[in-house]
Amino acid sequence: MRRIKRIVPAYFTVILLCAVLLWPLSKLSFSGYFLDAQFWRYLAANLSFQNYIEPCLPNVFENNLICAVNGSLWTIKVEEGFYLSVPIFYWLIKAKKINFWMLSIATYVFAISYYNYFNSIDLYVIAKQLPGAMAFFIAGIVLFKKFEFFYKRKDVFIIPSLIAFFLEQYVLETHLLKPLSFAFMIFYLAYSIKYLNRFGKHGDFTYGIYILHFPLIQFFVDLNLFNSYNSVIVSIAVVTLTLFLSVVSWNYIELPFLSNDRKARHKKLLSINKK
């Protein structure tokens, strides 16, 4: 329920606002746009976290490279699949007494086997979904489970992780240790660069950035602003607007729906930073 409160309000807001506010870009009449079957497919698909079914709105962004309104949202259903797997894992380990490491290894092997099979037959769009993405989640679970071990040895593991990742990604084009090496790279950055740990001192704006950046980029591309003006300046404008709207989203859409203890932690963090 806490994850639902954290994810759904802002997610639904962005989906609905895009559906309504992007109508002028479609060049369709008011009734032609809002009565179009594609409009309702878009709402049904995206509000049910099935973005891939209908990522586009009627005649919106049709001249862009892709017409998807918010192409990043395909990861939401994968993330929710991760959440749903946690009680299943817990049940298998606690109730069925399955060894944690055996279950983790078996899940990881199954996930990369699934990924490699579908990728080998040119179905990457299927490979990257669940259960193929589960290997990354397992890597994160292992890092959490053995946090102290990896934290103390992070400077030792980072070089092998970098080598393994870049070899698989750019030379061998394989997918075996990549989830583990990639997860540790993120772990290393998070706990080695102090600035990253201060990023959220005024609020957690990362989710807003995630759900807002894609439609904003599409909007700027549709208006041909990157070609009409200096692309660096336009890029800075996109980033600035994304950050501003993310702050608005956090304070007025996301924060009000959070649990009381989560709000209390946020207030405590703010008071510490003010001191």
Image (tube, grey):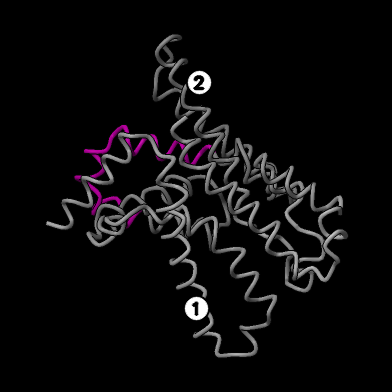
Pinpoint residue 12: horizontal percent, then vertical percent.
60, 46
User: Compared with residue 80, is residue 152 higher up or lower down, i.e. above or below?
Assistant: below
Residue pictured at 22% horizontal, 48% vertical: 269
Residue pictured at 65% horizontal, 52% vertical: 16
State the residue position of label 2: 88
State the residue position of label 1: 237
User: Compared with residue 106, is residue 248 higher up or lower down, i.e. above or below?
Assistant: below
Characterize the local packing of mark 1: few (<14), some (14-19) or many (20 or more) Cα atoms within 10 angstroms.
Answer: few
Please name whichever residue, 260 or 170, is drawn nearer the observer in this view of the structure.
260
Q: Secondary structure at mark 1?
A: helix
Q: Secondary structure at mark 2?
A: helix
Prevailing secondary structure class for the magenta stretch in the rendered image = helix
Please name whichever residue, 195 or 242, is drawn nearer the observer in this view of the structure.
242
Characterize the local packing of mark 2: few (<14), some (14-19) or many (20 or more) Cα atoms within 10 angstroms.
Answer: few
Which quadrant does the C terminus fall into?
A: bottom left
Q: Amino acid at mark 1?
A: Ala
Please name whichever residue, 92 or 156, is drawn nearer the observer in this view of the structure.
92
User: Mark 1 or 2 closer to N-term?
Assistant: 2
Residue pictured at 70% horizontal, 75% vertical: 222
Q: Which residues are magenta?
A: 134-160
**Numbered circle sitting on residue 94:** none
Please name whichever residue, 111 or 42, is drawn nearer the observer in this view of the structure.
42
Q: Amino acid at mark 2?
A: Ile
Horizontally, is 217 left or right of 118 in the view?
left
